[in-house]
Amino acid sequence: MSIERLFIANRGEIAVRIIVAAKELGITTIQAYSEADADMLAVKLADETVCIGPAKATESYLDVNRVVAAAIEESADAVHPGYGFLSESPEFARAVEQAGMKFVGPSATTIERMGDKVAARQAAEAAGVPVVPGSKGRIGSVDEAVEVAAKVGYPVMVKAAAGGGGKGIRIAQTEDELRILAPQAQQEAVAAFGDGGLYVERSVKSPRHIEVQIVGDGDKAVHFYERECSLQRRRQKVWEEAGADCLDEETRENLCMAAVALAESVNYRGAGTLEYLYEASTKEFFFIEMNTRIQVEHPVTEMITGFDLVREMILVCGGAPLSVSQDQIKRSGHAIEVRLNAEDPFMQFLPWPGKVESLKMPEGEGVRFDHFLYEGYQIPPFYDSLIGKLIVHGKDREEAISKMAVALEDLEINGLKTTIPLHKALAKDPSVASGDFHTQWLEPWLEAGNLKPENT
């Protein structure tokens, strides 16, 4: 193993997750933290720690020069970016590599190629992976967007070529709407990513969001089956499952092998996820983008396959070949993850950072809670509101939903508002139980008043 000292350039639950995986490999962990995160659980668990700047993320976790300088100062062999922050920054990956350290993820060139949604779309087409009909590259003007839309048919989605997280996206039903919304999407993309590039694609009606987990060693790649992430609010996932019960075996096989083909075509190294839209009525799937990092929802895949994905990505990025072949990866049962945020779901999901006064965690077979909480911990107000992920595994989807409902009742985080009530309501909902939902289902459900304090 060529990695002996691992620098963790992230925070929160993913930092804790990386520390656990690295320690099991006998690697010394070095945790970076901002001044606001001095009391963070990851700081307490790591072998060594280093402050990288003030609370403001642009002056700490998002400052490439500060992070790389700190990693060099701590004599790190490698840097793990987690998810978010600099995890999909080709500049960061390149700076780490140029400093003589390993980047626990794909090469800067691969991140650059797959991080730009237009370039990723072109790579998918070259690998024979179906894509949503749309523009062949970035559009140069609103008139060009209108021309593309006329060919593929309305409604269309105009999307930022860079970035993610639902930013820089608009859906237009008509040409008049497109002429208004395209400039808005461009302005939002510039503000969020510093890149106003756009492309246009057909808007798939009532799609399911399916993604495939892959790991590659730069030569070969394998898949760890699929997840469904269709329950979303403002294009942010809130409830994720593995596998996707809406797929038949033939479609599942085609979807997963298409993901492997694309990963191998770009010499992918590390853990990555290929995201698709699936139209259940026609059984068609379309590639939309690739996330060149570990995903928030990776635990559900670990639960159904029995593999530690963070461990595997550390190994391959350290120079080892894949430790497993495709025929050795089997799936068993069904897993569900819910994202727990410090937000008030009865006040338009207003962020609610506070102090954890008491904490009671669910236990039992097939129950997992990934988090960074402890009693007395003050949630800082400067970062994403995600505070943990509750994951369950059952023999089938029905048992997993039942187990999730029980685990949510057993979980208590006192002192702050959380999204636990939302997930309690979803676990009881008949449409969720029957799998009758899609990516546009949750927001109308919320607007219809289905989330009520007395029902959670």
Image: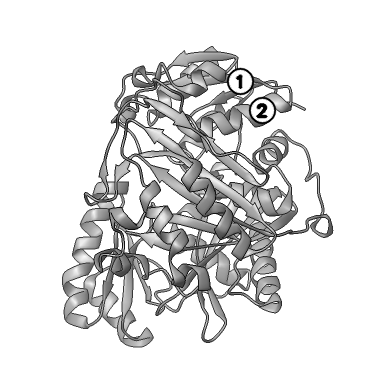
216 left or right of 31 in image:
right
Residue picked out by circle 1: 29
Residue at the disc numbered 2? 22
Q: Position of residue 446 (x, y in %)?
A: 29, 63
Q: Coloured how?
A: one colour
Local secondary structure at mark 1: strand
Please tell me which residue is depicted at 29% across the width and 69% down the height of the picture.
444
Rate crowding at label 2 as few (under 14), some (14 to 19) or many (20 or more) other CA atoms within 10 Å. Answer: many
Quarter of the image that includes the N terminus: top right
Closer-to-camera residue (413/202): 413
In the displayed structure, does residue 357 sit left or right of residue 313? left
- Can residue 434 be spotted in the picture? yes
Which of the marked residues, 2 or 1, is nearer the chain's N terminus?
Answer: 2
Taking the view exactly as shown, the residue that stands out farthest to the front is: 454
Q: Which residue is drawn at 36% across and 47% down?
A: 419
The quadrant of the rendering that contains the C terminus is bottom left
Q: Which of the two residues, 28 or 44, is positioned nearer the viewer here?
A: 44
At label 2, the amino acid type is Ala
